[in-house]
Image (tube, rainbow, N blue to C red):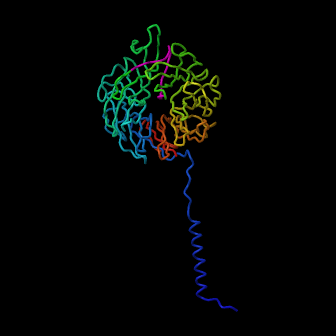
Amino acid sequence: MKTLNPFKTLLFYMFLITLSCKDDAINNTQPTPIIPEGTTEVVTTLGGTKNESGQAVKKTSDGGFVVLGFTQSTDGDVTGKTNDSYDVWVLKYDLESQIEWTKTFGGTNDERGNDIIQTSDGGYAIIGFTYSNDGDVTNNNGQEDFWIIKLDAQGNLIWQKTYGYSGIDTGHSILQTNDGGYFITGVLDVTASNGAGNTKSMQTQHAGGDYWAIKLDQSGNLQWSKYFGGFFSDTAYDAIQTADQGFIIVGSSDSADTDISNNKGSYDFWVVKVSSTGTLEWEKNFGGDEIDEARAIVNSGDGNYLIVGDTRSEDIDVSTNLGAADVWVIKISPSGQLLWEKTYGGENFDVGRAIAVSNDDGFIISGSSRSQTGDLIQNKGQNDGWVFKIDANGTLKWQQSIGGSNIDFLYGVTQINNGTIISVGESSSDDFDITENKGFTDLLLIETK
């Protein structure tokens, strides 16, 4: 019988033990968890004991983002405010979603911010409206005026301008033009303007509210002013500059005369193309025989445009209706030809309010929903905030509804460089996805991967 060498036997057992330890180490290594696209990671409410709302959010050149809304509170997360009228509220975040600064702007009456952009100098420009004629506001022309505010990169007020007449004139969107100036759009109160804003002959009468388009230079000085519409209500919500230096304006119209040539029924998506000097080049209606309202436009990346809003129709241009109201997305060419259209939603009321290009050339849409079937799988109660992604062809990739048992809306959306999707709106809930309510209505901020 062969005797084993004790030294070799020891080495053999040590080798086995080493292999076993390596196997254990491999087995105990946990793979990095993969977060499914469209997963909501953080839900934050901001505000004080009164009312706050987030209306717009834009990514910034430093990798962070800026939020615009309005605030009524003088406590909680709101600082530097001394009265309980509504003021414009701006919040700047870094790329880690940490607040860098917040600012409020306004007078002793009500002001609200509707849209914000980062400007070419690293600062910001804001459009909204004002009822004041004191504080940060000078030269109010009536009740409610367009109010444009220019800030530096730290949120300090550089200049501000008001545009309006004696009635209720509301600014909704702003963009910086290729010449460094600004293009702002909103609604003119025609009946209170005494015809002063009318660029047509006095034989062509408008009424109600009209699209109001204003071109400003880089200091906010008026270069030209035009308005478009008919005898009923026409509301401009968004605009984009086109390759020929003109502009496409989108909103809703229930008029069927003057500038509107093809009303489909009730309110339509009304799309207006103007030249760089404001001359009307073409206008198109899209929709069915019910209420259809466009809210936002974005370049689709292939020379065309996507427009988002909502529809209650199920005929003419609208091929499908999933419930009471659906989010409706249309793709148009630069000449206004309808290329395709898609509806998204469920059995109840679902609306789209904002659209942004995603980092992979798809599109992120935000709005609200009361549905729990169709494209949705749950509703927490009343309106939930709704975020979803589509690809370049309009195919739904994922969706998330976020909210509590009360009313929750989303109005703005963007995707920052690290891939996080930031949505903003307002919430009056304090349960389910919303862990805290600080007052009546809070600014709602949602981070989605």
269 part of magenta stretch: no
Q: Quadrant of residue 336?
A: top right
Question: What percent of the width, then of the height, locates residue 411?
Answer: 48, 34
Q: Is residue 235 magenta?
A: yes
How many labels were placed on the picture?
0
Of 402 and 271, nearer the camera is 271
Which is nearer the eye, 280 or 29?
280
Q: Give the answer, above or below, for where 19 lies relative to 270.
A: below
Q: Is residue 22 above or below residue 412?
A: below
Determine whether, in the image, residue 384 is placed left or right of residue 320.
Answer: left
User: Does 74 sit left or right of 231 as displayed?
Assistant: left
Left or right for 366, reference 313: left
**Which corner quadrant holds the N terminus?**
bottom right
Provide residue 376's location: percent of width, then percent of height.
60, 38
Quick check: can you spot residue 24? yes
Q: Main secondary structure of the magenta part?
A: strand
Where is residue 174? Give x, y as percent. 42, 29
| Residue bounds of the magenta highlight | 224-242
